[in-house]
Image (tube, rainbow, N blue to C red):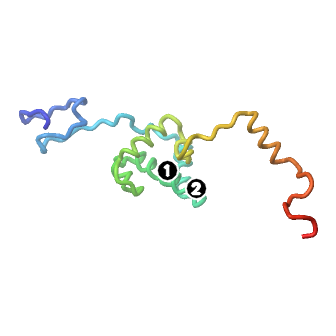
């Protein structure tokens, strides 16, 4: 339970994350990391990613969410537009987009340990790939 109020609205940003009481008092909710202003190049690129059938479905969904937030939708409404249930993923995506830009909507490695090869291992793999086979390439005896 929250603290009792005398009927006057207490507009304290530190308390904005708690539910409002009494119900007739409106809460002021402050977003921790709101979406930054989109330059026209980014808005065009997001629109193209959203409508492109060649983009991965995850990329299209993320672009749709970011455009909805940029157009003034709440995080919850933007999540529902993209078929999500909560606004937590939208908040995380907005924060990532603010830091990384358009690379935030691209799919990344999504499971297991990261595959890391050093320069020597990459070179060995490429040399083996380009090597010409010596002798027979099958295990069958000749004439079969």
Is 70 left, or right, of 28 in this rendering?
A: right
Residue 30 sits in quarter: top left
Residue 40, percent from left and from top: 53, 43
* Label 1: which secondary element: helix
Is 18 left, or right, of 117 in this rendering?
A: left
From the image, tell me which residue sits under label 1: 63
Q: Nearer the viewer, residue 73 or 106?
A: 106
Number of numbered discs visible in the structure rendering: 2
For this orientation, the residue located farthest to the front is 141
Q: Earlier in the sequence, mark 2 or mark 1?
A: 2
Is 14 left, or right, of 93 in this rendering?
A: left
From the image, tell me which residue sits under label 2: 55
Cβ–Cβ below 8 Å for labels 2 and 1?
yes
Image quadrant containing the C terminus? bottom right
Q: Nearer the viewer, residue 81 or 8?
A: 81
* Label 2: which secondary element: loop
Q: CA distance from mark 2 to mark 1?
A: 10 Å
Residue 114, percent from left and from top: 59, 40
**Residue drawn 14% across the image and 41% down it:** 25
């Amino acid at each position: 339970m929250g603290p009792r109020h005398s009927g006057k609205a207490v507009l304290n940003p530190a308390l904005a994350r708690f539910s409002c009481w009494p119900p007739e008092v409106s809460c002021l909710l402050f977003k921790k990391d709101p979406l930054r202003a989109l330059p026209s190049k980014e808005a065009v690129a997001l629109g193209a990613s959203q409508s492109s059938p060649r983009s991965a479905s995850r990329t299209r969904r993320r672009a749709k969410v970011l455009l909805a937030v940029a157009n003034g939708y709440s995080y919850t409404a933007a999540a529902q537009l993209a078929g999500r249930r909560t606004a937590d993923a939208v908040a995380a995506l907005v924060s990532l987009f603010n830091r990384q830009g358009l690379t935030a909507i691209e799919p990344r490695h999504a499971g297991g340990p990261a595959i890391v090869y050093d320069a020597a291992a990459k070179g060995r793999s490429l040399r083996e790939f380009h090597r010409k086979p010596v002798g027979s390439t099958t295990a069958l005896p000749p004439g079969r």
